[in-house]
Image (spheres, rainbow, N blue to C red):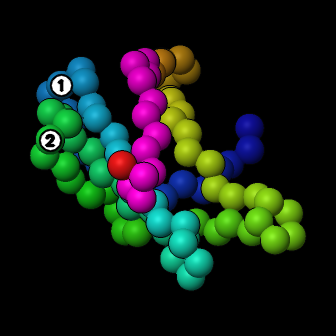
Amino acid sequence: MTKVETIERESVPLESDTVYMRIRADFHPGQDWAELDWSLDGKSWRRIGPRVGMHFDWQRFFVGTRFAIFNYATKAHGGCIDVDYFRFTCAEHE
C-alpha cells in the first residue's frame, strides 16, 4: 500500500446524522479562492480551515479546481456518504 500524506484541518465530533456543507469561491481575476463551511441546521455556519487558493487557467489549458465530496475510511474498509443534493449558484446572478 502506498503511504499518502494527509493534513487534518479540523475534527468535529458530531451528534447528528445530517451535516450541511458549503463552499464559497471567487474566480474573478486575481482572486481564485474558496472558503469551506459546515452546519448542522443549514443556517448557522462554521468555517473549516483557512481560505484555500484555487488556480484556474483558461487562457492556456482551460483547467480549474473541481468540487467533490469523498468518503475516506480511516479505521476500517468500507463506509459510505449519502449526498441528497448539490446546488450551484452564482452570486452575481441571484
1 vs 2, front mark: 2
Q: Where is residue 43 in the image (x, y as percent from the top left)?
A: 14, 41
SS label for mark 2 = loop
Q: Name the residue under label 2.
A: 43
Task: Give, as a single range, the part of the protein colored magenta.
Answer: 82-93
Nearest the viewer among 15 and 77 is 15
Q: Residue 38: where, in percent of width, then height?
A: 27, 45
> Is 13 rendered above or below residue 49?
above
| Residue in front for this viewpoint, 13 or 23 | 23
Residue in the image at 64% along x and 56% along y = 65
Q: Which amino acid does label 1 sit on?
A: Ser
Q: Is label 1 in a helix, a strand or a loop?
A: loop
- Type of amino acid under label 2: Lys
Asked if the magenta segment contains residue 88, the reply would be: yes
Q: Is residue 46 left or right of residue 36?
A: left
Extreme residue toward the front, this view: 93
x then y, percent, for residue 66: 62, 48
